[in-house]
Image (cartoon, rainbow, N blue to C red):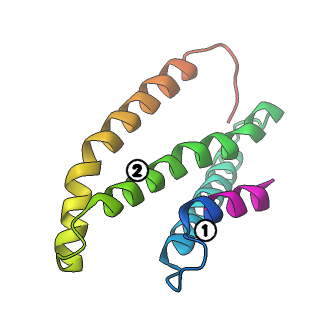
Amino acid sequence: AFTVMICFASLSLGKPGSKHYGRVMVANLDVFVIVFASGAAYGLMLYAGIPFQSLVLVLPFLLIGIGIDNAYVMTAGFDRSDKSLPIEERMYETGFSSGMSITVTTLTNVVALLFGSMTKIQAV
């Protein structure tokens, strides 16, 4: 399933026929970071003695959906930036234009996960 996600993210973020593979690398690294972070979190929680439940197996897919969303927002912001500017200014403009969208979606996700943590279901 992760292979399908990596392929979809690479194809949708990358430009077919382009000689620049930066977007494909962003998509791949975004998925890999989330997978490794999920594995580390599972290991830490199991080491702490928190029981593992099968419901938690859905979390990496949820986290990839949340994480890849920010990659799409950043690449769209980079595409909208002025191509005549140096790369440093384009990155600044990208962060400036995409920052509020990423902040709002992150805060929404945090609030949703906090409400989810108040349920009676115990899981990692």
Quadrant holding the C terminus? top right
Q: Residue at position x 29%, y 49% from top?
A: 98
Q: What is the distance, in whole Å, between disc 1 and disc 2 at their CAs? A: 16 Å
- Of tags 1 and 2, which is closer to the observer? 2
Q: Residue at position x 46%, y 56% from top?
A: 71
Where does the magenta region start and end? Answer: 1-9
Q: Give the x, y percent position of residue 59.
A: 68, 40
17 vs 121, left or right, is left
Q: Which image quarter: residue 89?
A: bottom left
- Number of other residues with Cα within 10 Å of mark 2, as a class: few under 14, some 14 to 19, many 20 or more: some
Name the dominant secondary structure of the magenta segment.
helix
Q: Nearer the viewer, residue 57 or 14?
A: 14
- Number of other residues with Cα within 10 Å of mark 1, as a class: few under 14, some 14 to 19, many 20 or more: some
Say if 41 sits above or below 123 in the image.
below
Q: Nearer the viewer, residue 49 or 105?
A: 105
Q: Which residue is mark 2?
A: 73
Q: Which residue is mark 1?
A: 28
Circle 1: residue type: Asn
Q: Residue at position x 74%, y 38% from top?
A: 58
Q: Nearer the viewer, residue 89 or 99?
A: 89
Find out whether residue 48 is within the magenta segment: no
Q: Secondary structure at mark 2?
A: helix
